[in-house]
Image (tube, grey):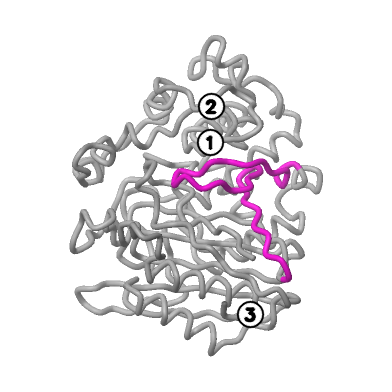
Amino acid sequence: MKIRMVLCGSAAALSLCAGTAAAVPVSAGSTGPAAPDRAALQSALDGVHRAGIPGVFAEVRDSGRTWRGASGVADVRTGRPVTPDMRHRVGSVTKTFTAAAVMQQVEQGRIGLDAPIGDYLPELVPGERGRRITVRMLLNHTSGIPDHIRYAFPSLTAQPVSADSLDENRFRHFRPAELIELGLSAPPTGEPGGPTGVYSNTNYLLLGQLLERVTGTPAEEYITRNVIERAGLRHTGFPTGPRIEGPHSRMYEALFGVLDPPRDYSVYDMSWVTTGAGLVSTMEDLNRFYGRLLDGGIVGRSSLEQMQRTIPVLALDGTTVQYGFGLHRVDIPGCGTFWGHDGTVWGAGTMSLTRADGRRRMSVAINLMRWGAPDSSGKPHPVDEALTALYHQALCGETP
């Protein structure tokens, strides 16, 4: 039996999403995750590094027991090693934070889930579209608004593909309104409110603008005070410039071999994704956050139930995920149901999943993205196979 674990549900344009979705085999006799096996986890991390990722680091928790590990280098030039406590650009994991902030405002009666977004932001989503698209549709990606990234980075879908857009936009500061307009000007991905969704970062930029409108506070500040600080996170925040403060790895982008050797994009202005994928965090903080969220410490139980009502959503890499409000659901027979999110930005990838009962938690970071072109025969890339083994060991306590 297999499930799909998508490592690319965020900041990459269309087919240029991260790698391939890794299929996780599950043994039929599995009865649930065993205690973290430190030697097996370290071996799985080392396997990811040997497969071609310069640096990988992770934290796994189970019932009060915590394992942290790292393998490889943070800088391929100097050989500086990665460490488990490094800060990292976590990409679309940010969406869970943004969705939780919106649900807090729903609880206070300032936002209606089924209210038209045009009631709040008529200048951004005017006319008939603003009347038909609701807040709920933005949260679960059924708005029909396309992702703006392919239009902000046109060289990624040009022929031939190039990294020109990545380099040109490294220090560019986008305004949310101009990115939202790029999404709204493109052909819709479907009718608002359809039974399935299409993943779009533009939806979460609009939710950031909605938070700002109803609270009178920049969305990043509201999320920091009411989500990040409420969760007790010490190393998580929105960067104020293109550089990451504190210990961190360099972040290498290969663009499926277009960049050889891969190029370092650890210094980058994140205004192109902000409330959709702009956060910096640590693996320890992510595990703490999802544990608090699922335990009712960030939003109320009824809000959490809304966040966990999933529908099929087409991800940017063409796979389908079960998506709620800023949450993926991953079901592993014999091991459990897990909630969380994955994320990628240029050069950095993250996966964070927590079992529904809050006991087993895994957060993994890697510092190379889009490492290889898909094999025409369908054979997984060695990195995908190694990540599959790591995720399975971390979540279920066994190697596939």
Image location of residue 349, percent across then percent down:
42, 60
Counting residues from the start of the chain, the first of labels 3 and 1 encountered is 1
- Residues tagged 1 and 2 counted as in contact (Cβ below 8 A): yes
Which residue, given by chain and number where applicable, does mark 1 sit on? 198
Image location of residue 9, percent across then percent down:
49, 49
The magenta region covers 306-334
- Viewer-side residue, 60 vs 237: 60
Seen from this angle, which residue lies furthest bottom? Answer: 39
**Which image quadrant is residue 149 in?**
top left
- Viewer-side residue, 80 vs 356: 356
Which residue: 61% across, 55% down?
A: 229
Q: Secondary structure at mark 1?
A: strand
Residue 167 sits inside the magenta stretch: no
The answer to whether residue 173 shows anywhere in this view is yes
Please tell me the numbered disc located at residue 144. 2
**What is the CA distance from the residue labelled 1 to the residue labelled 2?**
7 Å
| 263 with respect to 50 (left or right) | left
Which residue, given by chain and number where applicable, does mark 3 sit on? 397
Seen from this angle, which residue lies furthest front? Answer: 377
Image location of residue 58, percent across then percent down:
50, 73
**Which image quadrant is residue 48 in?**
bottom left
Counting residues from the start of the chain, the first of labels 3 and 2 encountered is 2
Looking at the picture, which amino acid does disc 3 mark?
A: Gly
Looking at the picture, which amino acid does disc 2 mark?
A: Gly
| 181 with respect to 95 (left or right) | left
Looking at the picture, which amino acid does disc 1 mark?
A: Val
**Which image quadrant is residue 190 in?**
top right
